[in-house]
Amino acid sequence: MRIHLIRHGQTDWNREKRVQGHSESLLTPLGQEQARLLAPVLKPYDIRRVYCSSSQRTRQTAELLFAGEPVETSFHDELREIFLGPWEGHLQSDIRERYPESFEHFWQRPEAFRQEGAEHFEQTQARGLAMLKRILSQQAAEDVAIVSHGVLIKSVLCALEDRPLARLWEPPVMHNCAHSIVVADPEHGRMRIEQFAGTPWPAGSAATIEQQQ
Protein backbone atom coordinates (compact mmCIF):
# COMPACT_ATOMS: atom_id res chain seq x y z
CA MET A 1 0.00 0.00 0.00
CA ARG A 2 0.98 3.63 -0.39
CA ILE A 3 0.50 6.31 2.22
CA HIS A 4 0.23 9.79 0.71
CA LEU A 5 1.29 12.52 3.14
CA ILE A 6 0.07 15.95 2.05
CA ARG A 7 0.67 19.31 3.65
CA HIS A 8 -2.20 21.82 3.61
CA GLY A 9 -2.34 24.66 1.09
CA GLN A 10 -1.15 28.19 1.76
CA THR A 11 -3.02 30.00 4.55
CA ASP A 12 -3.45 33.66 5.37
CA TRP A 13 -1.04 33.18 8.30
CA ASN A 14 1.53 31.48 6.05
CA ARG A 15 1.39 34.54 3.83
CA GLU A 16 1.77 36.89 6.80
CA LYS A 17 4.55 34.75 8.36
CA ARG A 18 2.43 34.39 11.47
CA VAL A 19 2.96 31.37 13.74
CA GLN A 20 0.13 28.83 13.41
CA GLY A 21 0.67 25.64 15.43
CA HIS A 22 -2.71 24.50 16.77
CA SER A 23 -4.34 27.88 16.11
CA GLU A 24 -6.76 28.20 13.22
CA SER A 25 -6.18 29.95 9.91
CA LEU A 26 -7.86 29.75 6.53
CA LEU A 27 -6.62 28.88 3.06
CA THR A 28 -5.87 31.80 0.78
CA PRO A 29 -7.11 31.73 -2.83
CA LEU A 30 -3.62 30.51 -3.76
CA GLY A 31 -3.85 27.76 -1.14
CA GLN A 32 -7.18 26.64 -2.58
CA GLU A 33 -5.68 26.59 -6.07
CA GLN A 34 -2.71 24.54 -4.84
CA ALA A 35 -5.10 21.88 -3.56
CA ARG A 36 -7.13 21.88 -6.77
CA LEU A 37 -3.95 21.43 -8.83
CA LEU A 38 -2.82 18.48 -6.72
CA ALA A 39 -6.20 16.71 -6.92
CA PRO A 40 -5.70 15.22 -10.44
CA VAL A 41 -2.22 14.04 -9.44
CA LEU A 42 -3.79 11.95 -6.66
CA LYS A 43 -6.70 10.63 -8.70
CA PRO A 44 -4.85 7.71 -10.39
CA TYR A 45 -3.99 6.26 -6.98
CA ASP A 46 -7.67 5.55 -6.23
CA ILE A 47 -7.48 6.75 -2.61
CA ARG A 48 -10.57 5.78 -0.62
CA ARG A 49 -9.50 6.55 2.96
CA VAL A 50 -8.31 9.93 4.25
CA TYR A 51 -6.90 10.66 7.71
CA CYS A 52 -6.97 14.41 8.23
CA SER A 53 -5.72 16.74 10.94
CA SER A 54 -8.63 18.31 12.79
CA SER A 55 -7.34 21.82 11.98
CA GLN A 56 -9.50 23.93 9.71
CA ARG A 57 -6.78 24.49 7.08
CA THR A 58 -6.29 20.76 6.59
CA ARG A 59 -10.03 20.13 6.50
CA GLN A 60 -10.34 22.72 3.73
CA THR A 61 -7.44 21.17 1.83
CA ALA A 62 -8.83 17.64 2.07
CA GLU A 63 -12.24 18.81 0.88
CA LEU A 64 -10.69 20.34 -2.23
CA LEU A 65 -8.33 17.44 -2.89
CA PHE A 66 -11.09 14.84 -2.87
CA ALA A 67 -14.12 16.85 -4.03
CA GLY A 68 -16.66 14.51 -5.59
CA GLU A 69 -14.64 11.40 -4.72
CA PRO A 70 -16.14 8.55 -2.66
CA VAL A 71 -13.65 8.82 0.19
CA GLU A 72 -14.09 8.10 3.88
CA THR A 73 -12.53 10.92 5.89
CA SER A 74 -11.80 11.06 9.60
CA PHE A 75 -10.30 13.92 11.62
CA HIS A 76 -7.60 13.49 14.23
CA ASP A 77 -6.02 15.82 16.79
CA GLU A 78 -2.92 13.58 16.66
CA LEU A 79 -2.22 14.88 13.14
CA ARG A 80 -2.21 18.57 14.13
CA GLU A 81 0.90 20.71 13.74
CA ILE A 82 3.52 21.15 16.44
CA PHE A 83 1.91 23.04 19.34
CA LEU A 84 3.72 26.35 19.88
CA GLY A 85 1.74 27.80 22.78
CA PRO A 86 2.76 31.43 23.47
CA TRP A 87 4.09 31.89 19.93
CA GLU A 88 0.83 31.17 18.17
CA GLY A 89 -0.86 34.09 16.45
CA HIS A 90 2.28 36.25 16.55
CA LEU A 91 4.45 37.29 13.62
CA GLN A 92 7.74 35.45 13.26
CA SER A 93 9.57 38.79 13.36
CA ASP A 94 8.05 39.53 16.78
CA ILE A 95 8.92 36.05 18.07
CA ARG A 96 12.52 36.53 16.95
CA GLU A 97 12.74 39.65 19.14
CA ARG A 98 10.89 38.29 22.19
CA TYR A 99 12.36 34.76 22.25
CA PRO A 100 15.70 35.02 20.42
CA GLU A 101 17.28 31.84 21.79
CA SER A 102 14.20 29.64 21.28
CA PHE A 103 13.64 31.11 17.84
CA GLU A 104 17.23 30.34 16.85
CA HIS A 105 16.87 26.79 18.16
CA PHE A 106 13.59 26.27 16.31
CA TRP A 107 15.14 27.07 12.92
CA GLN A 108 18.80 26.16 13.43
CA ARG A 109 18.88 23.50 16.19
CA PRO A 110 15.43 21.87 16.31
CA GLU A 111 16.71 19.05 18.50
CA ALA A 112 17.48 21.67 21.19
CA PHE A 113 14.17 23.57 20.95
CA ARG A 114 12.62 23.92 24.41
CA GLN A 115 10.02 26.68 24.70
CA GLU A 116 7.89 26.76 27.83
CA GLY A 117 4.27 25.98 26.98
CA ALA A 118 5.14 24.44 23.59
CA GLU A 119 5.79 20.97 22.23
CA HIS A 120 9.27 19.68 21.50
CA PHE A 121 9.91 18.40 17.99
CA GLU A 122 10.41 14.94 19.49
CA GLN A 123 6.89 15.00 20.90
CA THR A 124 5.35 15.99 17.57
CA GLN A 125 7.33 13.28 15.81
CA ALA A 126 6.30 10.66 18.37
CA ARG A 127 2.57 11.31 18.00
CA GLY A 128 2.91 11.34 14.22
CA LEU A 129 4.65 7.96 14.26
CA ALA A 130 2.07 6.56 16.67
CA MET A 131 -0.72 7.65 14.32
CA LEU A 132 1.10 6.10 11.37
CA LYS A 133 1.37 2.81 13.26
CA ARG A 134 -2.35 2.97 14.04
CA ILE A 135 -3.18 3.56 10.37
CA LEU A 136 -1.05 0.59 9.32
CA SER A 137 -2.88 -1.62 11.81
CA GLN A 138 -6.26 -0.56 10.40
CA GLN A 139 -5.58 -0.74 6.67
CA ALA A 140 -4.99 -3.62 4.30
CA ALA A 141 -3.61 -2.93 0.82
CA GLU A 142 -5.43 0.15 -0.49
CA ASP A 143 -3.82 3.57 -0.75
CA VAL A 144 -4.63 6.08 1.98
CA ALA A 145 -3.95 9.80 2.41
CA ILE A 146 -2.83 11.78 5.44
CA VAL A 147 -3.54 15.52 5.19
CA SER A 148 -1.48 17.26 7.84
CA HIS A 149 1.20 19.88 8.47
CA GLY A 150 4.80 20.64 7.57
CA VAL A 151 6.60 19.85 10.83
CA LEU A 152 4.58 16.74 11.61
CA ILE A 153 4.98 15.24 8.13
CA LYS A 154 8.65 16.10 7.80
CA SER A 155 9.51 14.81 11.27
CA VAL A 156 7.84 11.47 10.45
CA LEU A 157 9.69 11.21 7.15
CA CYS A 158 12.96 12.03 8.91
CA ALA A 159 12.36 9.14 11.29
CA LEU A 160 11.65 6.74 8.43
CA GLU A 161 14.91 7.62 6.68
CA ASP A 162 16.84 7.70 9.97
CA ARG A 163 17.56 11.42 9.60
CA PRO A 164 18.12 13.06 13.02
CA LEU A 165 15.88 15.96 14.00
CA ALA A 166 18.96 18.18 13.96
CA ARG A 167 18.70 17.94 10.16
CA LEU A 168 14.93 18.48 10.00
CA TRP A 169 15.10 21.66 7.91
CA GLU A 170 17.41 20.25 5.24
CA PRO A 171 15.87 19.91 1.74
CA PRO A 172 13.47 18.94 0.34
CA VAL A 173 11.37 21.89 1.49
CA MET A 174 7.93 20.89 2.76
CA HIS A 175 6.10 23.51 0.69
CA ASN A 176 2.34 24.07 0.77
CA CYS A 177 0.51 21.05 -0.67
CA ALA A 178 3.79 19.11 -0.81
CA HIS A 179 3.02 15.49 -1.70
CA SER A 180 5.11 12.73 -0.15
CA ILE A 181 4.61 8.98 -0.59
CA VAL A 182 5.55 6.13 1.72
CA VAL A 183 5.33 2.55 0.45
CA ALA A 184 4.24 0.32 3.31
CA ASP A 185 3.95 -3.38 4.03
CA PRO A 186 1.22 -3.44 6.73
CA GLU A 187 1.75 -7.14 7.47
CA HIS A 188 5.33 -6.58 8.58
CA GLY A 189 5.10 -2.88 9.49
CA ARG A 190 7.86 -1.95 7.06
CA MET A 191 7.99 1.31 5.12
CA ARG A 192 10.19 3.14 2.66
CA ILE A 193 9.99 6.66 1.27
CA GLU A 194 9.16 6.75 -2.44
CA GLN A 195 8.64 10.51 -2.76
CA PHE A 196 9.64 13.30 -0.36
CA ALA A 197 7.77 16.61 -0.84
CA GLY A 198 7.37 15.97 -4.55
CA THR A 199 10.94 14.73 -5.01
CA PRO A 200 11.53 11.06 -6.00
CA TRP A 201 13.53 9.57 -3.16
CA PRO A 202 16.49 7.17 -3.44
CA ALA A 203 15.69 3.62 -2.45
CA GLY A 204 17.19 2.68 0.89
CA SER A 205 16.73 0.11 3.61
CA ALA A 206 13.14 -0.08 4.75
CA ALA A 207 12.34 1.05 8.27
CA THR A 208 9.80 -0.19 10.76
CA ILE A 209 7.74 1.85 13.17
CA GLU A 210 9.23 -0.13 16.06
CA GLN A 211 12.75 0.89 15.05
CA GLN A 212 11.79 4.55 15.45
CA GLN A 213 10.24 4.36 18.94
Image (cartoon, helix red, strand yellow):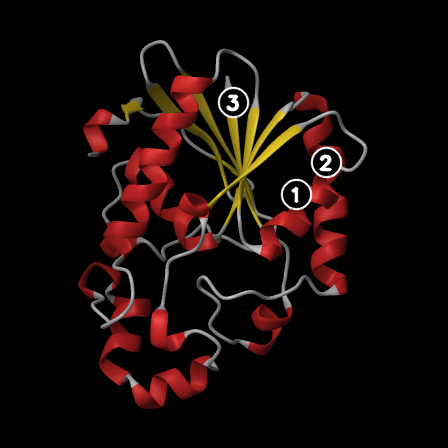
Q: Residues within 10 Å of mark 3 (few under 14, many from 20)?
A: many
Q: Mark 3: which secondary structure?
A: strand
Disc 3 to disc 2, how far (Cα)?
A: 17 Å
Answer with left or right where residue 81 lies relative to residue 53.
Answer: left
Q: Which mark is residue 66?
A: 2
Can residue 38 be spotted in the picture? Answer: no
Q: Residues within 10 Å of mark 1 (few under 14, many from 20)?
A: many
Q: Earlier in the sequence, mark 3 or mark 2?
A: 3
Under mark 1, the amino acid is Ala
Q: Mark 1: which secondary structure?
A: helix
> Residue at 59% across / 50% down in the picture?
58
Disc 3 to disc 1, how far (Cα)?
A: 17 Å
Under mark 2, the amino acid is Phe
Q: Nearer the viewer, mark 3 or mark 1?
A: 1
Q: Are marks 1 and 2 in contact (CB under 8 Å)?
A: yes
Between residue 63 and residue 122, name the one nearer to us. Answer: 63
Q: Which mark is residue 22?
A: none
Between residue 145 and residue 197, name the one nearer to us. Answer: 145
Vertical placement of residue 188 versus 23, above or below: above
* Residue 184 placement (x, y as % from top left): 42, 19
* Residue 123 placement (x, y as % from top left): 26, 51
What residue sits right under mark 3 in the picture? Answer: 2
Answer with left or right where residue 56 lies relative to residue 115.
Answer: right
Q: Are marks 3 and 2 in contact (CB under 8 Å)?
A: no
